Image: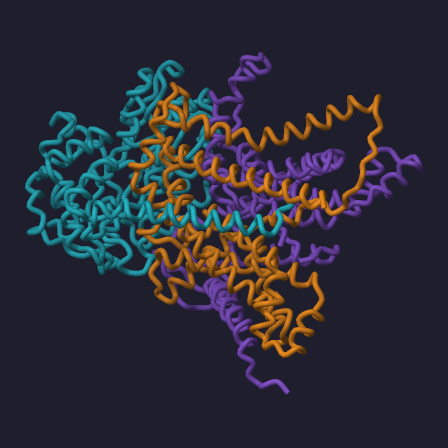
Chain colours: A purple, B orange, C cyan
Amino acid sequence: MKPRLDPFKLLTTIPVIIYSFFLILLPLVYIFFISFFKSDNYGGFEISFSLKNYLEIFNPAYLKIFAVSIFIGLTTTLICLLIAYPFSIFLRDKSQKTQNLIIKLVMVPFLTNSLIRTYGWITLLRKNGVVNSSLLSLGIIDSPLNLMYNNFGVIVGMVYTLLPFMILPVYSAVSKVDQNYLDAAEDLGAGKLRRFFRVYLPLTLPGAFNGSLMVFIPAIGFFFISDILGGGKAMIIGNLIKNQFLTARNWPLGAALSIVLLVMTFGLVKLYEKIGGNLDELGGG
Amino acid sequence: MPNLILSKYEPVSKMVVTKKPGARSQEQVLKTLFIILVLAFLFLPILILVAFSFNESQMNIIFTGFTLDWYKNLFENRALLEAFRNTLLIAVLSTLISTVIGTISAVGFKKYNFFGEKFVGKLIYIPIVIPEIVMGISLLAIFTFFKIELGFFTVLLAHIAFSIPFVITSVRSTLYSFSENIEEAAEDLGATNFETFRYVTLPMIKPGIISGAILAFTLSLDDVVISYFAAGPGTNTLPLYIYSNIKTGITPDVNALTTLMLVVTILALFISSKIEAQTLSRRQGK
Amino acid sequence: MKLNEKTKFGIVGVLIILFVSIIFIIKNNNKENQFIGELNVLNWTSYIPEEIIQDFEKEEKIKVNYGTYSSNEELLAKVSSAAPGTYDLVFPSDYMVELMSARDLLEPLDLEKLPNKQNLNPLFLSQEYDTDNKFSLPFLLATTVLIYDSSKLDSLTSYRDLLKPELKNNVVLLDDQRVMIGAFLNAEGFDSSDFDDAHLEKAQNFYKKLKPNVKAFDSDSPKTFFITKEVDAGIVWNAEALLAKQENDNLKIVYPAEGFTLSMDNYVILKNAKNRDSAYKFINYLLRDDVSKRIVEEYPYISPNKSAENLSPDELYEILKNGTYIKNVGENIKKFDTFWANIK
């Protein structure tokens, strides 16, 4: 019989228990508590119990930010899907060597700082920027377009930053689709679209949902992108939460907003599990 | 918090694609063009940032002329160098610590049933899926609650906190790919738990550990959101330095530093694929 | 990406060695200028030139950890969420000095340790927000101004002129709640610190009319918008306007007819500051005549330092007469927070 206290067991289980308790559970539970407290207007809070902070979220101004964020998040996700699918399907036709090379290239942007890449978009999108001056000199437009300091700019920045997170799982799923199914479908007279909707899509759904989660969730939280490309007004939930902590000094409201965001996230993850997604594959792990 | 594991995305099926020549070649050209356009989209801002590292003007707005001065200035900008050093130090330390904890924990999860295993097993997914901002503020709140002064230590702790789950899932995916029989055989032969781990398990899960470590390192290197909340006055990291300077305009020495980092990483990738190609051909030659 | 395990191990090893050596190189490099002290400063963005901080570090061997904020509210949030003693020296404006001292966040200043305070113009001392300068000494005076591109716009004299339809999506505003709400209140003929609900609602309606014209909010570097010709008009800080004008001669600067905000930013030392002596040394350094002069040369705000005066007494008199300081409104601060959350 094994001794009751197996030191190896202690070594392999105690750290993760301590870690998950102190650095995951406790902080979130504390935020949950704060979300019921009362703000003192100066960055502190009074211990109390009220649902006031949750009710405050229904303030039309905040609801609008929620609506705009979800719009930005969904648009970003959709655009990423619309790029990632054809990209992956077309890439599948290439030789193994080319595929490896291109997937490596897709990952290179990760190796440069994401802020400075986003900053690069200012040079491209501003009124006299690269995009506008090219379009003007080509005669496609006669006055500069407003490409940033609005939702459009924020969406461009989000798509840019998050696209690889969509391409990688979608490509991984698409490349696993058995060629025989596709050939069979083609032999049975299925056109390209039909093959996509009847073969590719069902077989790659968990991959696509995985990518969508990895795009949508950051897209409503990445405040630095809307800071840089949104001109301080196209606000997403991430900005709203950040502002509660860093300018409005209303931690309880920021905490309540975070809890709402958390519940939304958990809902999406549950949905992902329901359609057959594996939690271990989220984000590649 | 999205992430990637390099090995995960290699195509599993090595399917032979039968190309039909002729009529389809035009279509092939269009498909290739699409792929190139997507890559161009991904690389455009990077090209801009590299170009501006050679720009004479201090403002990162209009290209006025070519200079290499910023590469020299870079080494005189103490705040930038210090931020860079902190970033590397935090990345190396958090990678080492989270890889060790993540690896032994993955083993523990597989080997043992322990108190709260299921619950802890669910908890560790949270940092992977929740918005970074929620993770950031919850850590800030708990640091404030325990009156831990924000600084190097809190940033390090925060980076360890978000890296461990990625290491665990990465190690676990290799851990579950081999049979327990091997470990049991070792134990039947009289090996202690530690010996089995050291001589049997560890060598087998090495690829998972390394992938996890690379991932933890990249995540730490580029983290803005969580560091933003966890950092104190004396600990700037490179992303935080850039974030605070974006407000007034990034100077080209930051571009120069980023360009240098980019060159180093691309070189590493290039060398790795060279070695990889060599080993592959050597193996095929046998 | 298929990496053979040994290769991966090799890369990781090489990278770790590389990074660790870089860390050590940088560390050793720093040893050359051994620091004997440290100082944690939070200041407004674009307020002290970096070279001045570096010169101070060399002279006093004190390492300055310099962070920035964009509004008084952000400063307050940062100070109150951090553990006491995290920051030593900060630069709140007038009303925020009053609010912070009322919240017991400030350490009384020991003026004995600041011999260079004699360089200050008495005109700026003992103000209403801190009579007797118990907690603060003035650092720089900022004012809000209107700025516009005269090649695009004939004239612009008041906040109301910003409503012109030809300015659609062409205006930049400061990202600062009290200052901007103050301007909207001014535009409706009220005091910039008026917290009467009906008056605030009028101000909110003014913003609703202005909104289609607003391209961005930026406190940190609104000048960039004018230098790159991204916008044609805006409400910005005086120094930002002057710096923009240096780059683009078509820009015109005016003091708005309805009134404008004066914002005196002050040196204050925070309660429980750990590096008090360093803080005094830094304040005293910044009060030096030559240093004050260099600051306003780079950021042309109005210096309270006698020898760094960049305005004629008459101009200064006019500005002080026509501008108003923002006032501390106590608990009513909540109304401004909500106002701001509603319009952004």
In the picture as drawn, the residue positioned furthest to the right comes out as A188
Image check: C339 left or right of A130? left
Quarter of the image that includes the N terminus of chain C: top right
Q: Residue at x 54, y 17 (%)?
A: A134
Residue B71, image quadrant: top left
Q: Residue at x 85, y 37 (%)?
A: A194
Residue B81, image quadrant: top left
Image check: C51 left or right of C343? left
In the picture as drawn, the residue positioned furthest to the bottom comes out as A1
In the picture as drawn, the residue positioned furthest to the front comes out as B286
Taking depth in this image into account, of C271 and C66 the one nearest to the observer is C66
Residue C62 position in % (x across, y down)? 19, 48
Residue C95 visible in rendering? no
Residue B81 visible in rendering? yes
Q: Residue at x 34, y 17 (%)?
A: C155
Up the image or down, B230 lies above or below C229; here it is: below
Image check: B187 left or right of A90? left
